[in-house]
Amino acid sequence: MKYPAMRNELLSYLKDLSNWDYQNDCWVNGKCPYGVEHDELDYAIHFLFDDTVLSDDPESLIGVFLRNKEEADSIRSLCNELQIVFEKYGTELSDREYINLVEWKDVLMFAQLAFRKLSGTEIQHTHNPTERNN
C-alpha cells in the first residue's frame, strides 16, 4: 500500500460517518471526544469528493490506499448514498439537518459497511437513529 496514512484518514472518516451519536455530539453540539478539537461533516465530504477521486473512481486507488475491488465498491456505495442526499436536499444544509434526514440512515448503514470492509471491525452503537424524535 502506497499511502497508509491516507487509508487511516479514510477509516477515521468512515467511522465518524457510521456513528450518529458521534455526529450529533461532535458535529452538531461541539462536544467532541478527547483529542478531537473540532470536527464536522464537511471534512469527510471533502476527503471523499474533493481531495481524492473516491467518489468518482475508487478503483483507481486500489494499491494506493484501498486494497481491492470490494473495498472500492463499498466506498462507491457510500458516495452514491451521499450523492442521493445532496441531489435531493442540496449541499447547504447544516450538519444537524443532514443527520436528521430520513435518508441519513442509509448513509450510516453504507458507512458502517465500508468501515467493516476496510477495517475488518464491527462498530457497536448504542443509539438507533431511526428511533429518535425530530
Image: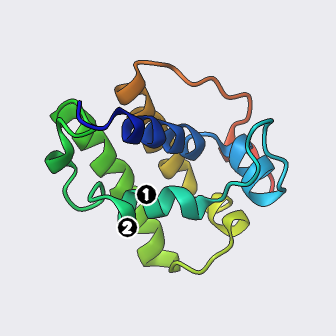
Q: As displayed, is residue 25 above or below residue 99?
A: above
Question: In the rendered view, does 46 fall on the left or right side of 74?
Answer: right
Residue 56 position (above or below residue 67): below
Rendered-image quadrant of the C terminus: bottom right
Which residue occupies the foreground of this view, 14 or 20? 14
Q: Quadrant of residue 93?
A: bottom right
- Badge 1 marks a residue whose secondary structure is helix
Q: Residue at x 50, y 80 (%)?
A: 90
Q: Residue at x 20, y 45 (%)?
A: 61
Mark 2, Cα crowd under 10 Å, few <14 / some 14-19 / many 20+, is few
Q: Position of residue 119 (x, y in %)?
A: 41, 24
Residue under numbered circle 2: 50
- The span from disc 1 to disc 2 (Cα, nearest Å) is 6 Å
Residue under label 1, please give it. 47
- The residue carrying pointer 1 sits among few (fewer than 14), some (14 to 19) or many (20 or more) residues within 10 Å by Cα, namely some
Q: In this view of the protein, can residue 44 be seen by the observer?
A: yes
* x and y percentages locating residue 117 in the rendered image: 35, 27
Counting from the top left corner in percent of width and height, residue 31 is at 85, 48
How many badges with numbers are in the image?
2
> Which is nearer the eye, 34 or 25?
34
Q: Is residue 107 above or below residue 134?
A: above
Say whether marks 1 and 2 touch (CB < 8 Å): yes
Apparent side of residue 106 relative to residue 118 in the rendered image (left or right) = right
Kind of residue sitting beneath label 2: Asp
- Judge left or right: residue 59 versus residue 17: left
Question: Element at badge 2?
Answer: helix
